Image: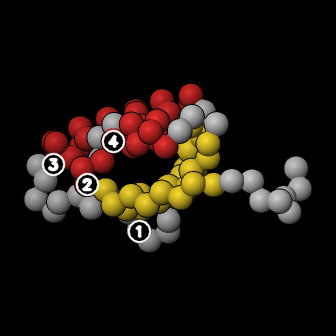
Amino acid sequence: MALFHVRMDVHLPHDLDPQVRAETLAREKAYSQELQRSGKWRELWRIVGQYSNISIFDVESADELHELLSGLPLFPFMDIEVMALTRHPSRID
């Protein structure tokens, strides 16, 4: 398994149809909760004062992470920053 730190900044268009917005957000919530239940989306934290989050994904590869992220309904409206993580030698387990 590989851990990734992912920052997602959402930029929904102001003129997006309200019904499309509501449907997209509902699909996003369902998909993200499915990934959380599966253990692939381990952590999800909101960044205070921003339409952004920090997440930790636990997946097999960068390719799998890309597939999961590109499947997000909000993906077309996001700026995403990904950092691969590895265990620190000073970490106490």
Task: Identify the residue under disc 1.
Answer: 50
Q: What element carries label 4?
A: helix
Q: Measure the alpha-carbon separation of dots 3 and 4.
A: 23 Å
Residue on which the image places disc 3? 18
Residue 42 in sight: no
Q: Which of marks 1 and 4 is in front?
A: 4
Looking at the image, tell me whether mark 3 or mark 1 is earlier in sequence order.
3
Bin the neighbour count of mark 4 within 10 Å (Cα to Cα): few under 14, some 14-19, many 20 and up.
few
Q: What residue type is labelled 2?
A: Phe
Give the distance between the C-alpha atoms of the residues marked 3 and 2, in whole angstroms: 15 Å
Determine if residue 1 is in view: yes
The numbered disc on residue 77 is 2
Label 3 vs 4, first from the N-terminus: 3
Q: Residue furthest right?
A: 92
Amino acid marked by disc 3: Pro
Above or below for 13 versus 4 = below
Q: Are marks 4 and 2 in contact (CB under 8 Å)?
A: no
Q: Nearer the viewer, mark 3 or mark 4?
A: 4
Circle 2/circle 1 CB separation < 8 Å = no
Report the front residue among 84 and 54. Answer: 84
